[in-house]
Image: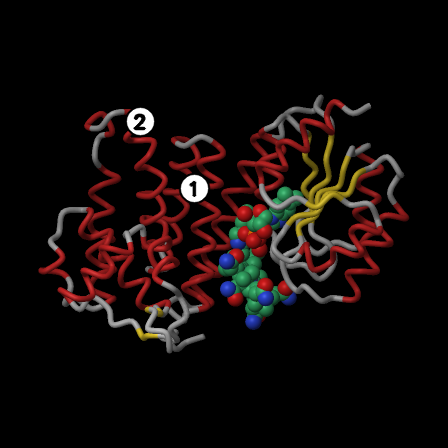
Amino acid sequence: MSVVNTEPRHSIKVAARKTGLSPHVIRIWEKRYKAVSPQRTPTNRRLYSDADIERLRLLQRATQAGHSIGQIVGLSLEELNELVAADNMSVTAQPTHAVTPQATERLLPESYLDTCLDAIKRLDAKTLESTLTRAAVALSQPALLEQLIIPLMQRVGDLWRGGLLKIAHEHLASAIVRTVLGSLEETLSVSQSGPSLVVTTPTGQFHEIGALIAAVTAASEGWRVIYLGPNLPAEEIAGAAQQSQAKAVLLSIVYPSDDPHLVNELKKLRRYLAPETDIVVGGRAADAYNDTLREIGAVILHDMLSLRAYLETLRSRR
Ligand code: B12
């Protein structure tokens, strides 16, 4: 993980999506400025590494802030990081009345995202937390989750896998995001009258941010959320669901995708829960347990939009 991943594996389409540049601009920057030098497949298609993508992303941000590509293209990755971080400080400090409210809404999640990423790269927990807290106040709840926190953690994962961030950076990011989401969930879960929902991850599942995002989403829809944290045995989950008379148990399954012990835990959970309590499962590895989930009658959902729709139906069910 400590070596930068220069293995070329992303198409120009992926590079465009991850950097916010059009494929056309990427090609021009390559030809005219030698911004990056992608490898080619046997059929002559361009292939970009994680390091190429990070370089293009930083060049995009810097040119967006007003620097000319010709002047900055020779900078190292580190120098580009510093330049973009300095620009972000001044962008977020600008008074928002200088732009229209619509423009502010469109621009803000992205500029928060850059500030957060820069703070993570500098291991600056204080700036990361204060930026996320400001974003939580300024952005709508779906924008906060779907346009800032989810893409931020995905970006951290990509940079970590690519060797551009160390485990320490990822841990710092996870800890702060976890704290911010936890306090958001607590603030939103003040309602004691709504229907209740238990949210957790089963034994062996340590990735908890997806579960926390589901908890915040449900709480913002008026559900009384009992958030139990990660890695919980079936007995405990069922006990909490029974005590709180939960209408459903929401589970997040992220990694690993081949745990035989988890199969048993899921079957046990179904046996322990009252038959009228739904089991709802999401997360990147949920589909890998499809057979078991189908067998226990669980609902599989892939995103927060379908979670909201599902919760609305569940609320009206007697
Ligand atoms: C943070 C993190 C960690 C942290 C987790 C901290 C915490 N408290 O949660 C720690 C350090 C513990 C960790 C450990 C490991 N991790 Co990790 N981790 C990540 C990282 C960077 C972010 C995860 C995250 O929070 N993402 C943001 C959330 C919002 O995304 P999500 O979980 O996928 O959830 C989304 C959907 O799946 C869905 N969803 C999730 N849950 C639910 C629930 C419901 C009900 C619904 C509707 C939807 C839903 O909605 C979410 C939003 O879209 C990812 C990279 C990534 N791209 O995700 C790697 C990643 C998940 N980790 C990975 C790996 C390999 C590991 C380790 C094995 C590393 C190691 N060598 O030790 C260990 C495994 C630990 C274990 N025993 O399980 C791999 C998994 C690869 C794979 N095959 O799937 C990833 C993808 C990194 C990578 N690119 O290689 N990790």
Percent coordinates x, y for residue 206 in the rendering: 64, 59
Q: Where does label 1 land, which residue? A: 147
The answer to whether 180 appears left or right of 11 in the picture is: right
Percent coordinates x, y for residue 172 in the rendering: 46, 58
The answer to whether 266 appears left or right of 50 in the picture is: right
Q: Residues within 10 Å of mark 2 (few under 14, many from 20)?
A: few
Q: CA distance from mark 1 to mark 2?
A: 16 Å
Look at the image and name its color scheme.
secondary structure
Front residue of 197 and 292: 292
**At x 35% / y 70%, what residue is drawn?**
47
**At x 37% / y 55%, what residue is drawn?**
18
The answer to whether 246 appears left or right of 10 in the picture is: right
As helix, strand or loop, the secondary structure at mark 2 comes to helix
Quadrant where the C terminus sits is: top right
Q: Residues within 10 Å of mark 1 (few under 14, many from 20)?
A: some
**Residue 210 visible, this orientation:** no
Name which quarter of the figure residue 317 lies in.
Answer: top right
Quadrant where the N terminus sits is: bottom left
Amino acid type, mark 2: Gln
Percent coordinates x, y for residue 92 in the rendering: 26, 39
Quick check: 176 above or below 307?
below
As helix, strand or loop, the secondary structure at mark 1 comes to helix
**At x 61% / y 27%, what residue is drawn?**
221
**At x 18% / y 46%, what residue is drawn?**
65
Query: For the view shown, which residue lies furthest in the front direction?
Result: 43
Q: Which mark is residue 102?
A: 2
Q: Which mark is residue 173?
A: none
> Of label 1 and label 2, which has the lower sequence position?
2
